[in-house]
Image (tube, rainbow, N blue to C red):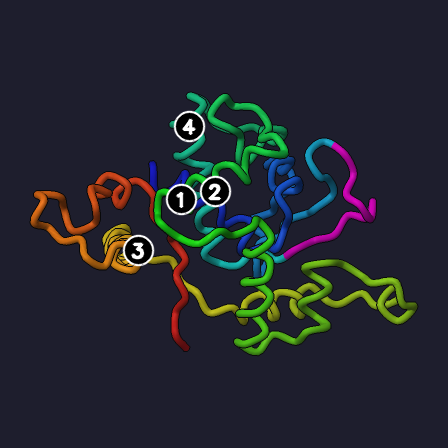
Amino acid sequence: MSFLRYDMRGHDKAHTDANKGIIAGLRWRDFDLTQKPLGRLTIARSYDAATKTEQPRTVPLHPPLAEMLLEWRQTGLLDLTGRHPQPDDLVVPSHLRVMRSVHMNRENLLNDLKRLGLRHRGTHDSRRTFITLARVDGARKDVLEQSTHGARGNILDLYTTLPWPTLCEAVQCLKVRRLSEKECTETLAEIVRANLTATEPDSDESNGQSSNGGNDELVKETVPRFPRVPP
């Protein structure tokens, strides 16, 4: 389950463009995975309070994320909490089974980046990545904005309600797929080795260490599941 736990900590944000407060406050009653053509997430809270706009909005779930949520609900949370989740249960609780704090996600992100030897990133970088790649893959800016930020302040936006299939089409433009655990392990191993080579160009295996600097267990336990897929 280590693969799935890593997934749910970060990729829910990356594939819905939701901020850390929204992710922390998500409960299973906010999801409708049976909705077509894509599953639906209703965003109405940040932690346990209303969002900044105080206006709920619905967001389409990218297919790999919907698949992961279903798997997390059926097996991951059972492994973590010892029981099947209920509608009011948190989707991504902390290891103590309570709501994640304002600092917890950021600290986890920074710790992971440090262990992997990657440059500093903020939690909003996943928002930038989602929007950028979706637009590169053909998503209409105005439609994508309705999903990621809701209606803006101008009168035309406030009086525009886009059909659900139109919103789904914009999100589905994003070309990613869920890789197998083997593919993920190989991808992460390459990342670790590349970063070690960049920071320690003179190091080699002569000291008896493995080629990834002793990070074999890290490669097995911490795996990104949504690498970019070329068109």
Q: Mark 1 vs mark 3: which is more N-terminal?
A: 1
Query: Disc 4 marks which residue?
Result: 78
Percent across and percent down for residue 109 are 48, 43
Density class for disc 4 (Cα within 10 Å; few <14, some 14-19, many ≥20) is few
Real-space CA distance between mark 4 and mark 3, rounded to the nearest whole angstrom: 40 Å
Asked where in the image residue 91 lies, by quadrant, the reply is top right
**Residue farthest toward the front in the current orientation of the protein:** 202
Task: Write the residue at 26% across / 51% down.
Answer: 185
User: In what quadrant of the picture does the N terminus appear?
Assistant: top left
Q: Is mark 1 in CB contact (under 8 Å) with mark 2?
A: yes
Task: Write the residue at 59% across / 74% down.
Answer: 135
Q: Identify the disc placed on residue 114.
A: 1
Nearest to viewer (mark 2 / mark 3):
3
Identify the amino acid type marked 3.
Thr
Decide which of 148, 126 is in the foreground and name it: 126
Identify the amino acid type marked 2.
Leu
User: In what quadrant of the picture does the C terminus appear?
Assistant: bottom left
Boundaries of the magenta span: 49-59
Q: Is mark 4 in CB contact (under 8 Å) with mark 2?
A: no
Above or below, comparing residue 63 to residue 81 in the picture? below
Is residue 60 left or right of 48 when viewed as pictured?
Answer: left
Query: Disc 3 marks which residue?
Result: 199
Is 55 magenta? The answer is: yes
Decide which of 5, 202 is in the foreground and name it: 202
Real-space CA distance between mark 2 and mark 3, rounded to the nearest whole angstrom: 18 Å
Task: Write the residue at 58% across / 31% down.
Answer: 100
Nearest to viewer (mark 4 / mark 2):
2
Real-space CA distance between mark 1 and mark 4, rounded to the nearest whole angstrom: 30 Å
Query: Disc 2 marks which residue?
Result: 110
Density class for disc 2 (Cα within 10 Å; few <14, some 14-19, many ≥20) is some
Is 20 magenta? The answer is: no
